[in-house]
Image: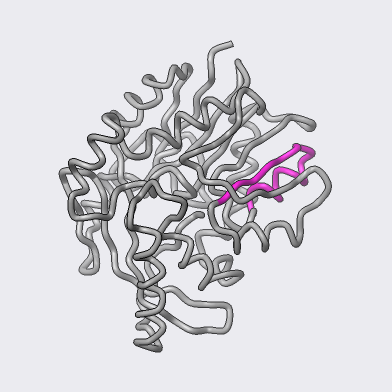
């Protein structure tokens, strides 16, 4: 369920905004219920999601990850928060057997429409992944799942602390690691707290206690209708990410500063919007 960046355009209809917000409220009643606030957004965007500029770097990202993770044809890859499946499709073209999972039924439908042999998609909640040592590699990119679990309720701090003492996104990471076979590799991206605070915009509200940024923006549908929505993105520092991956037992940890479509081995810095974590599950 990779989330879109800011879109500055105004909503075309107050009623559309109200309808979408109502769907958000249903999913938000409890952040660990069967739904998620992103589902209504994905339903509205549909195929239009792939018009965002940050989705245009898929080939470069997959080429880098194929080398960084040592992926070879025939290996099984799990793509968590796959959205319409752009990374899954690209990996499948390289001979990998890929399962993409996303909480958005609409995105899963779109992904399955163009799925090649060896690539499949299922609607699953990243917080409750059912897999156990089944995959050679796991990826979760562009805030597809990791980074979208920050509680949106008024008692966010205490609720998150009670449910997940480490971080609300910890169950997603733990589930991805559990899905890996021993010796398997993982790659996931996380939004940079440094970048978010340094380039805070008028529509942003950054909660320093939780590291969650709240943004009000507009998203566009396939037929060009804009609606105003709320986004919540958890932001991280490299130190926090290292502590989390160590807590789930990963080794050979590398953290790079990256920009969508420009993955590489740059060390973390203040001007990279994302961090890319690459690590291994002990054999």
* Apparent side of residue 17 relative to residue 159 in the rendered image (left or right): right
Q: Is residue 266 left or right of residue 270?
A: right
Q: Nearer the viewer, residue 133 or 250?
A: 133
| Residue 56 shown left or right of residue 197 in the figure | right
Quadrant, the C terminus: top right
Q: Position of residue 258 (x, y in %)?
A: 44, 44
> Residue 272, percent across and down?
36, 46
In the rendered view, tell whether residue 4 sits above or below residue 14. Answer: above
Magenta residues, as a range? 86-102
Residue drawn at x 79%, y 38% as measured from the top left: 95
Please tell me which residue is depicted at 41% across the width and 83% down the height of the picture: 16
* Magenta-span inclusion, residue 236: no
| Residue that appears at 60% across and 31% down | 131
Magenta region includes residue 91: yes
**Rendered position, 174 above or below 272:** above
State the image coordinates of residue 248 (x, y, percent, origin top left): 42, 21
């Amino acid at each position: 369920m990779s989330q879109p960046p800011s879109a500055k355009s105004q909503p075309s209809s107050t009623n559309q905004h109200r309808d979408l917000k109502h769907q958000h409220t249903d999913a938000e009643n409890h952040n660990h219920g069967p739904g998620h606030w992103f589902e209504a957004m994905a339903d509205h965007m549909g195929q239009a999601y792939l018009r965002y500029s940050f989705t245009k770097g898929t080939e470069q990202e997959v080429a880098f990850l194929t080398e960084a993770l040592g992926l070879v044809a025939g290996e099984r890859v799990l793509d968590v928060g796959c959205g319409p499946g752009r990374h899954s499709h690209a990996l499948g073209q390289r001979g990998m057997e890929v399962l993409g999972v996303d909480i958005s039924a609409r995105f899963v439908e779109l992904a399955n429409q163009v799925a090649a042999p060896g690539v499949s998609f299922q609607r699953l909640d990243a917080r409750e992944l059912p897999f156990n040592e089944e995959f050679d590699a796991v990826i979760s990119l562009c805030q597809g799942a990791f980074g979208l679990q920050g509680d949106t309720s008024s008692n966010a701090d205490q609720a998150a602390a009670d449910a997940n003492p480490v971080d609300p996104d910890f169950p997603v990471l733990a589930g991805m690691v559990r899905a890996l076979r021993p010796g398997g590799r993982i790659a996931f991206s996380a939004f940079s707290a440094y970048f978010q605070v340094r380039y805070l915009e008028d529509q942003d509200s950054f909660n320093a206690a939780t590291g969650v940024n709240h943004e009000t923006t507009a998203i566009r549908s396939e037929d060009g209708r804009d609606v105003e929505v709320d986004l919540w993105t958890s932001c991280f520092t490299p130190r926090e990410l290292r502590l989390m991956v160590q807590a789930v037992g990963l080794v050979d940890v590398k953290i790079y500063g990256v920009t969508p479509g420009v993955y590489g081995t740059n060390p973390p810095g203040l001007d990279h919007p994302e961090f890319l974590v690459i690590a291994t599950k002990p054999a």
